[in-house]
């Protein structure tokens, strides 16, 4: 290979002229278009992948692989009429394949499995293509686990991202009629158990702050007043972090557990809390002295009370959240 070859030129010496298949200007223009496509479509691709997999780290891997394939095909000179359609198809198909293998792993998961938490107040771009933030909630993502991977893809593309059945059929490799049937069946299944949330975001945040302040301050009476009679608490430690070994039901039992040493973070070395939106719902991160999250807790609030508490302390599900500088919102 000559120096010219490394810049995209080939020298045909027997004819005494240069053939230039791709000049530096052409390559730069192509790279610029690819970069623009990445910036434009990454939020949508991540939104699809995260809702398919319920894992931010795995969704990032899927998105990177989809764009790598897009880059590779573009580099070959393949004409891609619609980058959005191409990337959506690759992202969804990769997610379907990944979800099939992930379900096998989840069957042997230690304790309760919950989605990997996503900080939606710092990832506004992630939700801009979604119809509602509720489709990001942990309750909704857990409910999606009842669908097969293909049903999940069809349902999300239709109900959340508003794709046409002709587009969905191309993505999942089925007929439009079949996709309609799958969508109707999946929608009926989801609607029957779809969670309810307090309509006012401001009211949810106010109740959540009171809830976490009661937990941090050991205020049993204040905490009980914020819990629904049939409240349920779930904990996901994955066998790697302290968590409730099984779901806890009922106002009094949940209050006792939440005010115990495990829930208040004594076993995790928690020193403070930061109030955040997690998966579109009010929540809090419990931080160690270095600002690293050791637990993420999110609340389902409806009818002015907390209906469900979900706590994730599996360190493998918290690493992507990074560290938080500055004083916490509350001491623990």
Image (tube, grey):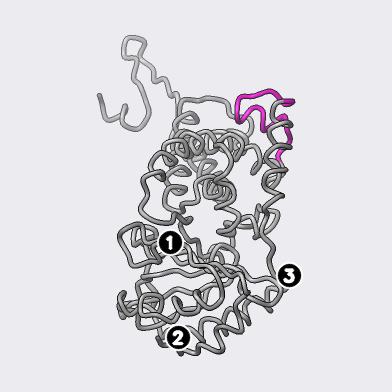
The CA distance from mark 3 to mark 2 is 26 Å
Mark 3 in CB contact with mark 1 (< 8 angstroms): no
Q: Which mark is residue 192?
A: none
Q: Nearer the viewer, residue 240 or 317?
A: 240
> Residue drawn 46% across and 35% down?
100
Return the disc, 3 or 2, that comes first in the chain's sequence.
3
Q: Position of residue 293 (x, y in %)?
A: 38, 71
> Residue drawn 68% across and 79% down?
203
Judge the density around disc 1: few (<14), some (14-19), many (≥20) Cα neighbours within 10 Å. Answer: few
Q: Which mark is residue 199?
A: 3
Q: Which mark is residue 216?
A: 2
Tell me the quarter of the picture where residue 221 sits: bottom right
Q: Nearer the viewer, mark 2 or mark 1?
A: 1
The CA distance from mark 3 to mark 1 is 30 Å
Q: Nearer the viewer, mark 3 or mark 2?
A: 2
User: Which secondary structure is most common in the magenta stretch?
Assistant: helix
The CA distance from mark 2 to mark 1 is 23 Å
Q: Which residues are magenta?
A: 163-177
Using residue 221 as the reference point, say whether residue 267 is left or right of it.
left
Quadrant of the image containing the N terminus: top left
Mark 3 in CB contact with mark 2 (< 8 angstroms): no
Q: In the rendered structure, does residue 174 fall within the stretch colored magenta?
A: yes
Judge the density around disc 3: few (<14), some (14-19), many (≥20) Cα neighbours within 10 Å. Answer: few
> Residue drawn 52% across and 33% down?
93
Q: In the rendered structure, does residue 319 fall within the stretch colored magenta?
A: no
Return the disc, 3 or 1, that comes first in the chain's sequence.
3
Using residue 242 as the reference point, say whether residue 147 is left or right of it.
right
Question: Label 1: which residue?
Answer: 246
Q: Position of residue 165 (x, y in %)?
A: 73, 32
């Amino acid at each position: 290979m000559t120096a010219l070859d490394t810049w995209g030129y080939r020298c045909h010496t027997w004819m005494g002229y240069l053939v230039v298949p791709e000049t530096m200007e052409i390559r730069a223009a192509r790279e610029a278009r690819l970069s623009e496509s990445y910036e434009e479509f990454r939020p949508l691709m991540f939104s699809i992948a995260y809702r398919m997999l319920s894992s931010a780290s795995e969704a990032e891997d899927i998105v990177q692989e989809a764009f790598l394939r897009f880059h590779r095909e573009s580099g070959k000179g393949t004409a891609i009429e619609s980058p959005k359609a191409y990337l959506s198809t690759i992202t969804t198909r990769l997610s379907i394949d990944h979800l099939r293998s992930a379900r096998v792993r989840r069957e042997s998961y230690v304790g309760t499995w919950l989605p990997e938490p996503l900080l939606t107040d710092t990832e506004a771009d992630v939700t801009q293509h979604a119809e509602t933030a509720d489709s990001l909630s942990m309750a909704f993502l857990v409910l999606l686990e009842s669908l097969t991977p293909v049903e999940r893809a069809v349902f999300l593309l239709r109900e959340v991202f508003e794709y046409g059945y002709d587009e969905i059929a191309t993505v999942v490799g089925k007929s439009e009629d079949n996709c309609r049937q799958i969508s109707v069946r999946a929608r009926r299944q989801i609607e029957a158990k779809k969670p309810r949330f307090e309509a006012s975001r401001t009211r949810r945040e106010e109740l959540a702050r009171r809830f976490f302040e009661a937990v941090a301050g050991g205020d049993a009476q204040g905490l009980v007043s914020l819990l629904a009679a049939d409240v349920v608490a779930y904990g996901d430690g994955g066998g790697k972090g302290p968590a409730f070994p099984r779901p806890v039901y009922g106002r009094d039992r949940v209050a006792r557990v939440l005010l115990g040493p495990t829930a208040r973070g004594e076993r995790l070395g928690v020193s403070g809390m930061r109030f955040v939106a997690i998966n579109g719902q009010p929540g809090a991160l419990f931080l160690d002295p270095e600002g690293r999250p050791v637990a993420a807790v999110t609340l389902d609030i409806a009818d002015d009370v907390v209906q469900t508490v979900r706590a994730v302390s599996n360190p493998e599900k918290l690493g992507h959240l990074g560290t938080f500088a500055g004083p916490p919102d509350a001491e623990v």
